Amino acid sequence: MPCFWSPKIASVARDAYCSGIRRAATLGSQSCHRLAAKSACRRRSPIGVHSNVPYSRSFSAQVAVDSSPRHTYSYLPPPPIPLDRIVFIPQRRTPSRPVAKPDPPTPPPTPPPSPPSAAHMSRMAAQSIRLCTAQKAFGDAFYIFHSVRYSNDPSFSPSSKEISSFGHDLPRYADVAIEFGQAVKPRLPAHALLHSLLRAGQPELAYKFSIKMMDAGIHFHHRSLEAVIKHLTPLPNESPVRHYVRAVARQYNPAVFLSLGSAQFTNNPGADLAVRLLDAARRSHHRRTEGMFQHLMKLCLLHGEIIIATMLFATLCSDWKTTRLLTAQVNDMLLPEEIEPTAEAKERDRKRYEHLSGEGLRPHRAQLHDILTVVDTTLAREDTEAGFESTLKGALQALVNLAYLLDHRAIPYADLGMLIRTIYRCPRVQVDAWIPDPGGKQGHRRVDAYNYCHDVLNRLLNKLPVRRRQDLTPAPAGHHPPVQYSRRAIEDTMVPLSLRSCNALLHYALRHRMSLKEAERVLDYMVRQTGHKPDTATLNILLRSATLLRRSDIAEQVMQMFRHHDGSQTILNGLPREGQSTGTERGKRKRGRLEPAPSVASKGKFSKALAGLETDNVSLPLSPARMDKHTFTAWVTHLTSTGHPHAIADALFDILPQLYLVDHPAGYPQLEHLLRASSRTRERDLLRVASYGPYVFVCLLNALVKAGRTGLAERVWLLAKQAERASWLPQGSGRGAVRPWCLPIHAYTLMLQCYGAEARRYALTRTRDTHTNVVDWAPRAKGAVSGWRQYIRGKSVARSLNGREAARLLYTSMFAGARDVYGQLQELREISGHTRHVRMPVPDARFFNAALDTFLRPEHTGRRVVRGQTASMSAFKARSQLLAAMRRWEKYQEAPGVWSEQLQQVVEDMQDAGYAIPPGIRPMLVGRMPVKTLIWDGRVHAHGTRTPYAFPRRRKAYKYEAHRIPVVKTRGLPLGRSPTGRRRRTGQRSA
């Protein structure tokens, strides 16, 4: 059969053979030395027989990067010389001088050398492919490889659709294929060609080659496939978990969300190829590694493709379950009522999933943690961009994918606390998602994302996992057990939940379901099934939930458990008990005291939950625990909510003795000597206060504001700002180092409410001075002061102020304090772009309502700019007032109302945050802001609200609050305080 060769292939093949001979010579055998000597003699001569090989056809290489010139030679009739004859016939050496002695007798003819083995031919072909690709001759490399494939399958003939397309003009591949004389295994040449393409910078060509070879049945090493994936998708030098997700507009297709093979990246074509390669490896029973999945998950999170990241994690969980079932002894786990599978079905399934038993794939908590971080951050965002709605839908679909895994008990570890928390934080929005439905016609079905997430948690509460990991015993070596067909046994592979997961379920049962029975079930499961004892976090959840559900008896039981612990006595000494009265206690009034929840006769889920709160109870296990800062904040909040904030104010200096660090007139005079403390003592105490964290200061500010102690609240606020700055100072990385933190937006809202409430007293007490018992005070440091300090300093300087002047001074001081608080928040937001891993304060609706309530009064008069600030307004009335103000401006150029720069700043910040301007304020903006801004109704927040599941849905409002932003209640019970007379009548009727 004729053979068509180019000089490049001949040279490459000869070099490959010589390198193989040299490699064999290093082994030290005599035959190898003999072959090396022969090859050395041949290397001194020219190409030899290769230069005499006739060529009847030229061969041009398809070069992707650097095209090589075509080889054109004269066509001569080729002799039918096989490959081994062409390449491996050594030349005979000609003697350099004549021999003087007579010729010796002719020795017998030397037998011809035996042809090389198939393994040797495979190594030679691999080396030839490497040399061809190194010279950018990709067509020659594919030519050699297809010849190797043809040696195994004579019916093979590459069509015009093959990768290299070099043979599209050849009449028959059998006429041009290299003759090896025997079948050569193509696995080594295939790996050589794959890695050579990667080294040459051709990852897409390597991807196409690997896909076609896997379809053809050639098995690749898992490291080779991992190298292709990493070359297709190189990772940039940045963190794999981003605190935002890029807005990606896509058309929602159920097949895209539920099938990994049809997944499509929107901004990275190489990632599409990598995911398809991973799916092809799974279908062709190739081994996959954790490095492949980890690399692709990082890439998905970097590009905002969290849906594909969840599908990759689901694939890991599914393969891990199948692997466990194949390597475990499951014969005795089949249910007796099920039909025993036949031997043919067992063997078929064993061959189908046998490759999974050798894989070490296992989903890790870090992978799930990275995905949940991105999902939770996306759902918590208050973004108003145009593409964020699509991003929100993608995050909800990803959350539904993870909830589906939890519902089918497919996650193999016990620490699921973060997953449970992310699921019950799902915002209440009407967004549809898709879940697999194997029994359906289409293979998937549509569900409401919010309801499905809570249904999954409800099913988990009703059927908690109790099976242990050691029940799955590994199978003996060499034994292939049948595939498990029992759905119940597959679901029971979920291990018992950890203590953190049980605490998350307890929080869900109390706060979202408002069910004491379900909380009792979780506590019983925690103690009896898992063997865990309730820790401090468990009791903190019970304490805080009892406060919100108005169950003071449960809160008192929890505090008794803390008091039994010796380590909590030092913290509890400064805290008063519920109902304990002090010398200046003003909490005896009934205003502010929470009454038991009234009975509501209805069939809704909230009414049923409310009825259960009145009748059910929960038994707490008696296990003393040590109190921490979260317990402190929960107990202070409980005292404030039950009408005892003055007890916190009176014991403030016992609770927080570090208040001496603040130069402020509010407090006791006997603390004056502490101001002379050394700088080292001050620094040590400030770092200790910084270690408390932000929420300790928030709960104290809440109690002081509710008690009306403006001076003490301002003193705590100043100490909190000092501690906040101290937490950002470099302290090393030891155990006692304080992590940086920022005060949340609740602290700023409380201070605005405090200054606003104090300023409103100007309208009531303009004729008398209500603060006659203040002490004379002057600041020790130079500089301007505001707020309560400005008021006390002004009274100390001007001692002859009458009641009207003192009240005006009080108002202007409080106005200045509120302006400083607002300015500090703006300064902090300017540097928020340079911070990471710290939750920065973001203005919300309650903050803007407090700012409007404070700044709607002029700075010097104190009178309200508009009347009825808390009254509601219909849409027709709001539109009529706005049109009247516009006509007045067009006719008289008269701007209505009194305006201030601070109120202008608040309105602009409100618009930047995406909130609509209240209808009662819009007429005041005529002539001061563009008309388009006035008629703008505000972008609707697609993220919705994170209200508890048991709360009733909010009805559509036909009236709007005139001068406030609507706020949805998310804590406590959605019940208003009824008048005293109504409470008495309700109590008499119920009795």
Image: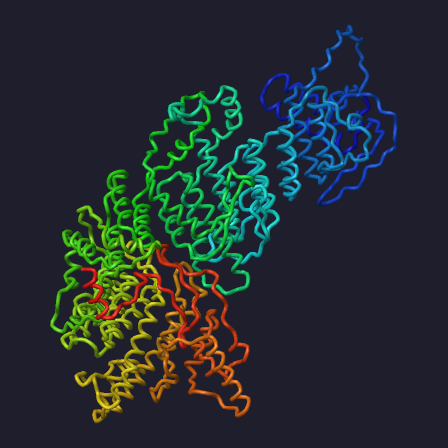
Q: Nearer the viewer, residue 565 or 542?
A: 542
Image position of 272 with respect to 3: above or below: below
Instruction: Give how far across and how far down residue 948 sits, in percent.
Output: 36, 56
Image position of 680 with respect to 321: above or below: below
Instruction: Give how far across and how far down residue 923 sits, in percent.
Output: 47, 82
Q: Residue at x 27, y 61 (%)?
A: 692
Q: Residue at x 53, y 39 (%)?
A: 440
Q: Is any atom of residue 795 visible in this view?
A: yes
How many numbered discs? 0
Instruction: Give how far across and how far down residue 367 sits, in percent.
Output: 44, 45
Apparent side of residue 5 relative to residue 573 in the rendered image (left or right) = right
Q: Residue at x 46, y 48 (%)?
A: 400
Q: Residue at x 65, y 21 (%)?
A: 118
Image position of 941 with respect to 237: above or below: below
Instruction: Give how far across and how far down residue 539 sits, in percent.
Output: 23, 52
Query: Which quadrant, please, contains the N terminus?
Result: top right
Q: Is any atom of residue 656 visible in this view?
A: no
Single out the residue that lies furthest toward the front.
989
Question: Residue 773 is drawn in which quadrant?
Answer: bottom left
Apparent side of residue 119 relative to residue 457 in the rendered image (left or right) = right
Q: Nearer the viewer, residue 822 or 325?
A: 325
Question: Residue 199 is drawn in which quadrant?
Answer: top right
Query: Which quadrant, please, contains the C terminus?
Result: bottom left
Q: Nearer the viewer, residue 6 or 425?
A: 425
Single out the residue that lies furthest toward the left.
583
Q: Nearer the viewer, residue 133 or 438?
A: 438
Apparent side of residue 86 relative to residue 832 in the rendered image (left or right) = right
